[in-house]
Image (cartoon, coloured by chain):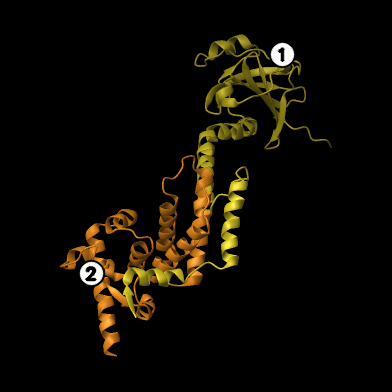
Chain colours: A yellow, B orange
């Protein structure tokens, strides 16, 4: 028996109905959704991936932005060691003095190329060493004065003085603020690092070996 | 906005029209409802036509999941350009009569575009313009599809009568 196509389509499709179980599940889904408006939102996989990607991108940007600070912080902790190594190396070489004088005044006059004037260190003077002379040198690429002394044992000691720039050398102990000098043993040489009168000072001497 | 039983059954029938299989249709409907409800939580504005919106979701998921798996139907290719559209109109299907048994047999041999067209036209009573609007499909393409569907149904009827 023939019938209009529209009626045939209706009859055909109406034979497909959700069974009770399927219908109940779909109704429950809707009820749970409407009753849990405050329920925590569970993002889809794509949304989670998008959120994760955004977070990762934000992290990368944050690290890139913070990198100079992180880098300088890392460097700051390595600077004293690097100074100690450089000073110890110079101390071992004992290059010839450019100016010989047991007093500081002629030495001050000699250092015309420095942007600071070498001073008598209160801390170092306590050792009672005899000044021999001085020569130009550098610490971390900055021109410095290298003063050579002889101690009571007849051993050479070196005192390095250079203008203190926190951006170059990072934070270091300032004895004028009551801070304790930093002692680092490098290449078998005992180096002592401190700030005094706005100058970075580093003394180098052979580490005492007990017999 | 929640869908009542008749609406859910209607969506199920739409999903069957697209998938052709009941199990796939239920999975499709469930996925679509999940997406609809999730969207409802995230949306602040009301949807003007929730049923059409839900069908759109069903269709989108079907296209994403099923059609890609099975490959695109070749009959979509430039049918508007390459198919001559002679004497067809939206009334072409209205005048068609068919035996119910024959329709049952031929249903599975129709492609999802043709089944979808019959669902929207036959069950929901949409006009060709309304179908074009809902499917975002050119009217000419739909008319070509109707022409092809009509030919297919007539051919099957002829073969059935002669057998």
Q: Is residue A91 left or right of residue A8?
A: right
In-front residue for pair B39/A19: A19
Q: Secondary structure at mark 2?
A: helix
Q: Position of residue B47 (x, y in %)?
A: 44, 45
Q: Is residue A178 left or right of residue B132?
A: right
Q: Quadrant of residue A182?
A: top right
Mark on residue A183? Answer: none
Residue B89 seen: yes
Dot 1: few (<14), some (14–19), or many (≥20) neighbours within 10 Å? few
Q: Position of residue B137 (x, y in %)?
A: 29, 57
Q: Read off the residue under disc 2.
A: B147
In-front residue for pair B91/A28: B91
Q: Quadrant of residue A66?
A: top right
**Image point (77%, 25%), residue name:** A153
Which mark lies nearer to you, 1 or 2? Answer: 2
Image quadrant holding the C terminus of chain A, namely top right
Query: Circle 1 marks a residue in which chain?
Result: A
Query: Circle 2 marks a residue in which chain?
Result: B
**Image point (37%, 75%), residue name:** B107
Q: Position of residue A48 (x, y in %)?
A: 54, 50
What residue occupies the far right of the structure in this picture?
A211
What residue occupies the far bottom of the structure in this picture?
B163
Mark on residue A122? Answer: 1
Q: Is residue B127 left or right of residue B32?
A: left
Dot 2: few (<14), some (14–19), or many (≥20) neighbours within 10 Å? many
Q: Is residue B11 above or below residue B95?
A: above
Residue B71 seen: no
**Image point (45%, 54%), residue name:** B54
Q: Secondary structure at mark 1?
A: helix
Q: CA distance from mark 1 to mark 2?
A: 106 Å
Image quadrant holding the N terminus of chain A, namely bottom left
In-front residue for pair B39/A58: B39
């Amino acid at each position: 028996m023939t019938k209009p196509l529209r009626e045939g389509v209706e009859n055909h499709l109406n034979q497909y109905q959700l069974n009770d179980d399927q219908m109940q599940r779909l109704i429950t889904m809707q009820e749970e959704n409407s009753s849990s408006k405050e329920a925590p939102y569970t993002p889809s996989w794509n949304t989670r991936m998008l959120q994760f990607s955004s977070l990762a991108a934000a992290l990368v940007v944050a690290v890139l932005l913070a990198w100079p600070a992180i880098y300088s912080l890392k460097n700051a902790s390595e600077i004293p060691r690097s100074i100690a190594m450089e000073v110890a190396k110079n101390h071992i070489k004992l290059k010839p003095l450019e100016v010989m004088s047991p007093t500081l005044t002629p030495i001050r006059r000699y250092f015309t190329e420095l942007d600071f004037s070498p001073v008598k260190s209160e801390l170092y003077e306590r050792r009672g060493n005899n000044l021999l002379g001085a020569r130009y040198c550098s610490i971390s690429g900055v021109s410095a004065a290298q003063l050579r002394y002889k101690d009571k044992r007849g051993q050479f000691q070196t005192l390095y003085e250079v203008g203190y720039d926190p951006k170059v050398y990072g934070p270091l102990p300032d004895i004028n603020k009551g801070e304790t000098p930093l002692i680092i043993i490098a290449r078998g040489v005992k180096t002592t690092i401190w700030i005094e009168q706005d100058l970075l000072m580093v003394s180098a001497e052979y580490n005492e070996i007990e017999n | 906005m929640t869908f009542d039983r008749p609406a859910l059954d209607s969506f199920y029938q739409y999903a069957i029209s697209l998938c052709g299989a009941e199990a796939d249709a239920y999975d499709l409907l469930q996925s679509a409802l999940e997406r609809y409800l999730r969207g409802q939580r995230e949306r602040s504005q009301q949807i003007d036509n929730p049923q059409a919106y839900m069908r759109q979701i069903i269709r989108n998921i079907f296209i994403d999941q099923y059609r890609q798996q099975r490959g695109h139907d070749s009959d979509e290719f430039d049918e508007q350009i390459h198919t001559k559209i002679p004497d067809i109109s939206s009334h072409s299907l209205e005048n068609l009569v068919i035996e119910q048994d024959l329709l049952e047999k031929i249903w599975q041999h129709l492609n999802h575009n043709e089944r979808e067209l019959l669902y929207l036209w036959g069950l929901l009573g949409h006009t060709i313009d309304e179908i074009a609007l809902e499917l975002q499909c050119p009217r000419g393409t739909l008319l070509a599809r109707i022409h092809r569907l009509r030919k297919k149904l007539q051919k099957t009827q002829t073969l059935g009568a002669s057998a």
